[in-house]
Amino acid sequence: MSNGVGRWAPAIRENERRWQSVARLKSSPAFDWPLVFRHILLSILFVGTYLLLNLPETIFLNRLGASTWYPANGLVLALLLHISPWYLWLVAFSDALSGALIYHQPLRSFGETLGAAGVAGWYAGAAYLLRGPLRIDSTFRRGDDVIRYLAVTSVAALGATATGVFCLLADHTIVLRDLSSAASKWFVGDEIGLLALSPFLLIHVFPSVRKGLLWSNEVDGQPAPHDPMKVEANKIPSLLPEAIGQALSLLGVLWIMFWPPLGNLIFMSFVPVLWMAMRQGMRRVTTGLVALNFGIIFAMHRFPLPMPIAAKVGALMFVVSAAGLIVGSTVTHRLLTEDELRQRTVYMNSLIENSPLGIIVLNRQGRVEIANEAFAELFLFEKPAELAGSRLHDLFPINRAGEVPWSEQVIRGDSFHRVIRRQRRDGKVLDLEMQAAPLMVDGGVRGGYAICRDISEQVRASEAERKHAAVLNRLVQELELKTSQMSLLNELASMLECCATISEAGTVVQDSIRKLFPGRHFCGSLHVPGFKKLG
């Protein structure tokens, strides 16, 4: 019977969990209406912004499928990546709506149906991979995240390009000989939007959107990460003049690119972007990339470039955006590493300085590198700096002959944990509990450290207790001996009362004497005065 119950127990527990889940669903409200309202508001804002970014003036459209850049896809990927890939249906609807309203495409065309759904599906798949299996940090704090982002979005852009261009071909919007040209322009335009606008939205805009949407300061259940660059930007006033200088450099580069005598110097756009990336990392360079790309589109509307140069602008924007992201992520990772190292250093210094135990750190030569206040006070030094560069066995003589200094043992790579005696500056001998270990760096001994505490009072108390215990033990032994002797004497008296002859009494006395003095050896016969010799 018990085996049967044990076999069915997992199923019973599973049914209980299911019923509890059903009960929770029944007891909870059917909809979180405030959350639904916020999603509706977000959807409306997304559709409006998407339509705005699809205007021909925004993307510098030559013909359908041939634009200098396509920032709407940057908005799409930011929404799918930071909020949810399930917004792909809203993306498909927005794409079809923009095609119908702005470009007057028939609703039953391939571009409005298969094209809109296919492009949304490609970017939703990219967002799923980046959020799920790859789990990138959407603020691009590591170079690896940028490389993964570039790889996945490039594949998605290739898929979206193939889907979109073949839909244009099926709709007879383009002819077969224009297929490669349209595909290259479509891909480059998508990539610029994915590399310039999407990172800017992911870093600066969508964290606030998600916070407002979920009424929380967390993203995916995790607290918002610490951003040392943002803190530093708020603390250092000198960054404001530099930001102004970077903005002026962007305007200067745009003027150089589009002023006819200097129009061939389009490569100058790298200068302000790399300046921002090297100095402030991802937060500033994403802002600069958006400003540069929108500035280029605005300038191309106002001051048209010759066709040979204009054809290169899209490729330039793509390369500058990719280079800015890679350099910016590298600098951001370095800044984060420096900030983490600084925090750890402050923490370790505080731990060492405020510790009630004496702490000392030695270099490879066994000389003092760091000592805290507790260690200096222990040996009556005014400041820990007095110990710097000294050898411990020179400062504190060894009291035991032949004892190897613990510092030498630690430098050899051995740990050390025992009680030692050292003499401090006033001549008093201290009993120290010392625990030391080598400092290992890259498999080699970099030095050593030790933690010690004064246990002189405990040692003296232990010695006094041991002496007291020895005295008590001796008194107990004497008392036990006297008790035993009294018992033997009482036994002797009782046995003597039972003796009928002197001979019997002598035998009893002889046996009792041997018991009273068990450690003595008697040669020959014992002679008891008043009795004849007993043999």
Image (spheres, grey):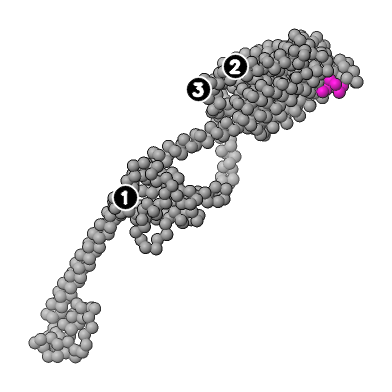
Q: Residues within 10 Å of mark 2 (few under 14, many from 20)?
A: few
Among the two numbered marks 2 and 1 on one chain, the one whose residue lies closer to the N terminus = 2
- Which type of secondary structure does the marked residue at label 2 adopt? helix
Side of 338 where 298 appears, left or right: right
Identify the residue shown where x is 76% and y is 29%. 155
The residue identified by callout 2 is 244
State which quarter of the image contains the C terminus: bottom left
Query: In this view of the protein, which residue sits in the foreground, 514 or 32?
Result: 514
Segment colored magenta: 179-184
Residue at the location (55% across, 47% down)? 441
- C-alpha separation, residue under disc 1 versus residue under disc 3: 47 Å
Q: Is residue 462 visible?
A: yes
> Which of marks 2 and 3 precedes in the sequence?
3
Q: Residue 425, labelled with which disc?
A: 1
Q: Which residue is mark 3?
A: 235
* Real-space CA distance between mark 3 and mark 2, rounded to the nearest whole angstrom: 17 Å
Q: Amino acid at mark 1?
A: Arg
**CA gap, disc 2 and disc 1:** 61 Å
Q: Of 16 and 513, which appears nearest the observer?
A: 513
Q: Say if 130 sits above or below 401 in the image.
A: above
User: As displayed, is residue 140 above or below residue 32?
Assistant: below
